[in-house]
Amino acid sequence: MSLRVDIETVNGVLIVRLEGELDHHTADMLRTEMEKHLVEEQVQHILLSMANLHFMDSSGLGVILGRYKQIAARGGDMVVCSINPVIYRLFELSGMFKILKIKESEQEALLVLGVA
């Protein structure tokens, strides 16, 4: 399976919906897509929706960490929502919860970012 990425910007929040598998085969594509939007649009925060993401490896973690650093350098936040138990465990083991906020839904994430 591959990765499907749906990206939109709402009130300064780059909403990235992921479906499929985020691994070493698809990480560069996600990085390129996100960076394009971060450069071209007025983005203050990033919301990652992982409701339909079924697999992720360390390459995926690297892409997420890199975009977190980019948005944090601008004074923004990154929130992850709708994360399944397998990927939740990966985030837990990698220490990502120490830097990222986790919410149940996109609506909750947008509320935390102050744009809903």
Image (cartoon, rainbow, N blue to C red):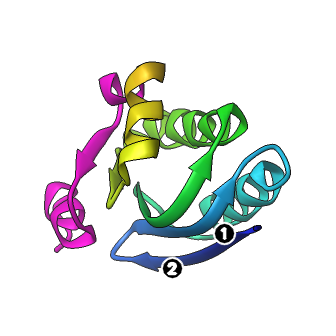
**Nearer to us in this view, 72 or 111:** 111
106 part of magenta stretch: yes
For the point 40% across and 33% down, the residue is: 89
In the picture, measured across the screen, residue 112 lies left or right of residue 35, that is left
Residue 77 on image: x %, y %: 35, 44
Look at the numbered disc 2 and give the secondary structure of its residue: strand
Q: Is residue 25 magenta?
A: no
Type of amino acid under label 1: Glu
Question: Quick one: quadrant of the N terminus?
Answer: bottom right
Is 5 placed above or below 50 here? below
In the displayed structure, would residue 75 be above or below residue 33? above
Q: Which residue is mark 2?
A: 8
- Which corner quadrant of the image does residue 64 belong to? top right
Q: Please name whichever residue, 44 or 24, is drawn nearer the observer in this view of the structure.
A: 24
Q: Amino acid at mark 2?
A: Glu
Q: Is residue 3 left or right of residue 115?
A: right
The residue beneath circle 1 is 40
Please identify, in this view, whether the residue under mark 1 or under mark 2 is nearer the observer.
2
- Horizontal side, residue 64 vs residue 60: left or right: left
Up-down relation of residue 93 to residue 48 (above or below): above
Q: Is residue 83 left or right of residue 15?
A: left
Q: Residue at x 76, y 67 (%)?
A: 2
The segment highlighted magenta reads: 96-116
Query: Can you say whether 61 is above or below 15 in the image?
Result: above
Q: Residue at x 56, y 33 (%)?
A: 65
Residue 13: x %, y % from top left:
39, 66
- In terms of secondary structure, where does tag 1 sit? helix
- Residue at horizontal 67 percent and vertical 58 percent from the top: 21
Q: Is 101 or 38 nearer to us in this picture?
A: 101
